[in-house]
Amino acid sequence: MGWARELIEWHARRRRFAQEWAFHRDLATREFESFGLSHREARQLAKRRLGSRSVHRRSALRHLRADYSALFELVPWYRLKVSPFLGPAIVMLVLTVLLAIGPHPLDVLSNSISLLPFTPARHVERFVPLAPSGVVPMGFADVTLWCFALIGMARIAATPKLRVHWRAWTFAVATLFLVIALGAVLWATGLQLLMQKRWASDTVQGAAIVTFPFAYVGWAFVALRIWYRDLLGRCPVCLRRLGMADLRGNANDLLIAPLEKDTVCLRGHGANVESRWKDTFESGQFTASPI
Ligand SMILES: [Zn+2]
């Protein structure tokens, strides 16, 4: 827990300024009190002698490496980049932003829940402007996202390293569910924004509404690809991103010496070989010193 220790040290350096300032202020106050001044007068003179606390504090914290820019440098970018939590955190952030900008966030949630089986469907009476307001047609998203889920599950089942390690498939299913939830919210919010009011130009609004499902399917393809590539690039044991990539072979050779990419888990859980023909993870083939 090196990062936690560095954070505690950063906080201790900040406290050190407060303690030193209090020490010098009390010293100066006592000195003025020894001249026969009252405590209040001595405090005021001490304050005048020491000058502005905020100016001293800013400069001291900079020198002690305890200001906010030092805190920013403490953030372990590398560890953050390889962490399994980065992707889900970004998806959660986008989900929250979509719910915040949507005109009817509660309807977005109930529309999204209606995609689950055995939940009542919400019927739209009029499309533009939407009636009841906030309820959008979910049929297209329903089909797209169920296909997304089935393709995703099939890919998990067809990839040995995801199927064999329980952490890898739990992570894969959880992230798949999260991306599908993002897809549902994206569809409901997008249609609410496009259809809740009648625009000045019917042609522009019609074109936007027709284009939206195509863009949505494009998004689904890209999201599925990114999700799957991300899973393949992770160690199935600790879920951190594999590193130390080493390329072998020739990109033009398909059978004799195809291009292969070797990566290893930097925690020593194993090595991964990826080529046009295979993507395998060999446990315990590589042992690195733990980071
Ligand atoms: Zn690992």
Image (cartoon, rainbow, N blue to C red):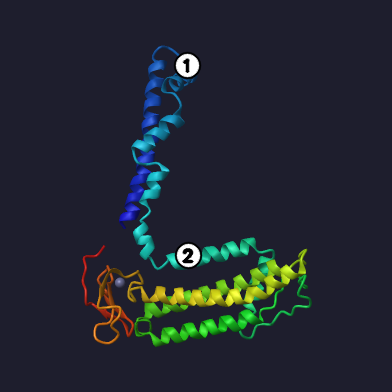
The residue tagged 1 is 38
User: Residue, x 54% and y 64% (percent of image)?
Assistant: 94
- The outermost residue toward the front is 252
Front residue of 184/38: it is: 184
Front residue of 29/159: it is: 159
How far apart marks 2 and 1 lie (CA) works out to 57 Å
Residue 136 coordinates in the image, percent (x, y)? 70, 74
The amino acid pointed to by label 1 is: Ser
Tell me the quarter of the picture where residue 167 sits: bottom left
User: Residue, x 31% and y 58% (percent of image)?
Assistant: 1
Residue 23 coordinates in the image, percent (x, y)? 37, 29
Q: Quadrant of the C terminus?
A: bottom left
Residue 221 coordinates in the image, percent (x, y)? 51, 77
Count residues near mark 2 (Cα–Cα under 10 Å), then give few for <14, some for 14-19, many for 20+. few
- Counting every numbered tag in the picture gives 2
User: Residue, x 59% and y 75% (percent of image)?
Assistant: 216
Per the rendering, the mark at residue 89 is: 2
Relative to 248, is 16 above or below?
above
- Tell us which disc is closer to us: 2 or 1: 2
Asked whether mark 2 and ligand 1 are closer than 8 Å, the reply comes as no
Q: Earlier in the sequence, mark 2 or mark 1?
A: 1
The amino acid pointed to by label 2 is: Ala
Tell me the quarter of the picture where residue 252 sits: bottom left
Count residues near mark 1 (Cα–Cα under 10 Å), then give few for <14, some for 14-19, many for 20+. few
Element on which disc 2 rests: helix
Instruction: Determine the quadrant in which ligand 1 lies.
Output: bottom left
